Amino acid sequence: MVTIVVRNLDEGVKQRLRVRAAKHGRSMEAEVRSILEESVRERENFGVAIIEAFRKHGGVELDIPPRTEMPRVVDFGPE
């Protein structure tokens, strides 16, 4: 395990951490550890999350018609 020391932490931040830790029923140290772990956790791709959410309900198949026209050209020039 690694030890990290945080210096010059604002007293207000410390108090809010203490309150937050109490709400979660854990020590301030455990709360900070939880915050750090959550902040660096790899996030699931949003598209993958949607697919997984629908998969448990049998999924959804969409009929996507083929394109019959070319996409329009967009002019981003000055007006």
Image: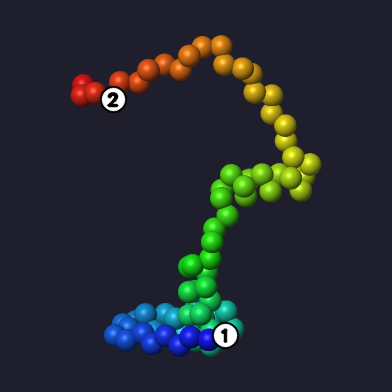
x and y percent of residue 14 in the render?
A: 39, 84
Q: Nearer the viewer, mark 1 or mark 2?
A: 2
> For residue 79, what is the image quadrant?
top left
Residue at the farthest front position: 1
Q: Looking at the image, can residue 27 be seen?
A: yes
Residue type pointed to by label 1 = Arg
Which residue ends up furthest to the right in the rendered image? 58
- x, y percent for residue 43: 54, 58
Near mark 1 (Cα within 10 A), the count class, few <14, some 14-19 or many ≥20, is few
Label 2 amino acid?
Phe
Q: Residue visible at 56% across and 48% down?
A: 46
Q: Position of residue 23 (x, y in %)?
A: 55, 80
**Relative height, residue 30 to residue 66 (above, below):** below
Q: Residue at x 74, y 40 (%)?
A: 59
Residue in front for this viewpoint, 13 or 40: 40
Q: Is residue 15 found left or right of 75 in the rendered image?
A: right
How far apart in space, not on screen, are marks 1 and 2 (Cα)?
Answer: 54 Å
Across and down, in percent, residue 48 comes to: 62, 47
Residue at point 42% right, 80% down?
A: 16
- Residue 22 in view (yes/no): no
Q: Quadrant of residue 3?
A: bottom left
Secondary structure at numbered mark 2: loop
Dot 1 corresponds to which residue? 26
Figure coloring: rainbow
Left or right position of 10 against 25:
left
**Residue located beneath label 2 in the image:** 76
